[in-house]
Amino acid sequence: MTKPSGYKVVRTSDVKALEVEEAGAEKARLKWLISEEDGAPNFFMRLFEVDPGGRTPLHSHPWEHEIFILNGKARIILGDEEVDVEPETAVYIPPNLRHSITNPGKELLRFLCLIPRK
Amino acid sequence: MTKPSGYKVVRTSDVKALEVEEAGAEKARLKWLISEEDGAPNFFMRLFEVDPGGRTPLHSHPWEHEIFILNGKARIILGDEEVDVEPETAVYIPPNLRHSITNPGKELLRFLCLIPRK
C-alpha cells in the first residue's frame, strides 16, 4: 500500500500474480512490486515465478534488465551464450541483447527483474 | 564479470563488501552488484548487510530507493513513521523522504537497495 508520504511497503504474498502472456512464455508469472502506479520515477521492480520446465520469452528490446535470483535454478540465454545460475546471483542484461530465462530445475524459480521506466 | 556482449553474472559472495562510512552508519556494509562500471544506463543494484544493532544513516536525498529484504529483520524510519519488515518485503522510499534502516534483530539483516543513476 502506498502511504500519504509516498512510501510503499508490500509483502510478495500480498501481490497478485499475472500470467506472462507474451508468445514463447510458458508457466511463467509476474508480480509488480514497485511500479509506475506507486510513483516510482525511474525504474520498476517485478518478481517472476517460473515453474519447472517453464520459461520467459526469447526476445530482445532496447531496455536493460537487472535481475537477482531468489530461489531455484535458472538457465539464461544471453546472446549466443547460456549460463546456469542459482540464488544469490545478480545478472545484468544490457539493452538489445537477446535473452530468455528457463527453469531447468525441479523447484520453483523465483527472481527479481527490474526495468527502467522509459 | 562483465562479458564482451555486455552482460554480467556475479555471485554476491564474490563481491567485496565496503564499510558504509557516512556519518550515522553503524555496522553496515554494502556490495555493488550492478553499477556504472558495468555499463548500467539507468539504475544500480547494491546489497546491504547490517549486523544486529547496526544501522544505515538517517538522511534524505533527492533520489528514490527500491528495496527488497532478503534476510533478517529491518526497522525502517520513513519520514515520521516507523515500520518493521521481514524478508519477502519490497519497500519504495520516494525522493526526499527522510529514512534510516536499523537491524533490531539477532540475525544479520541483508537487503537489496537500488538507486537511479542520476
Image (spheres, coloured by chain):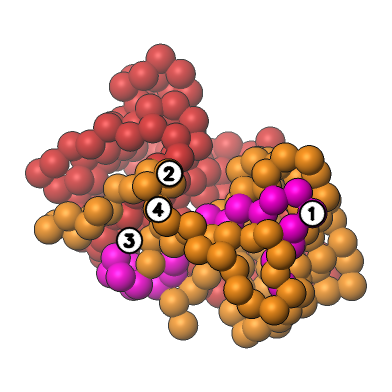
Chain colours: A red, B orange
Q: Which residues are magenta?
A: B36-57
Q: Give the distance between the C-alpha atoms of the residues marked 1 and 3, in whole angstroms.
A: 36 Å
- Residue at mark 1: B53
Q: Give the distance between the C-alpha atoms of the residues marked 2 and 4, in whole angstroms.
A: 6 Å
Q: Chain of mark 2?
A: B
Q: Chain of mark 1?
A: B
Q: Nearer the viewer, mark 3 or mark 2?
A: 2
Q: Give the distance between the C-alpha atoms of the residues marked 4 and 3, in whole angstroms.
A: 21 Å
Relative to residue A10, is residue B9 drawn left or right? left
Residue B34 in the image, given as x and y percentages of width and height? 38, 61
Determine contact: label 4, label 3, CB under 8 Å.
no
As shown in the figure, which amino acid type bears the numbered disc 2? Ser
Determine contact: label 2, label 4, CB under 8 Å.
yes
Relative to residue A10, is residue A101 drawn left or right? left
The kind of secondary structure element at disc 3 is loop
Q: Nearer the viewer, mark 4 or mark 3?
A: 4
Q: Residues within 10 Å of mark 3 (few under 14, many from 20)?
A: many
Q: Give the distance between the C-alpha atoms of the residues marked 1 and 4, in whole angstroms.
A: 24 Å
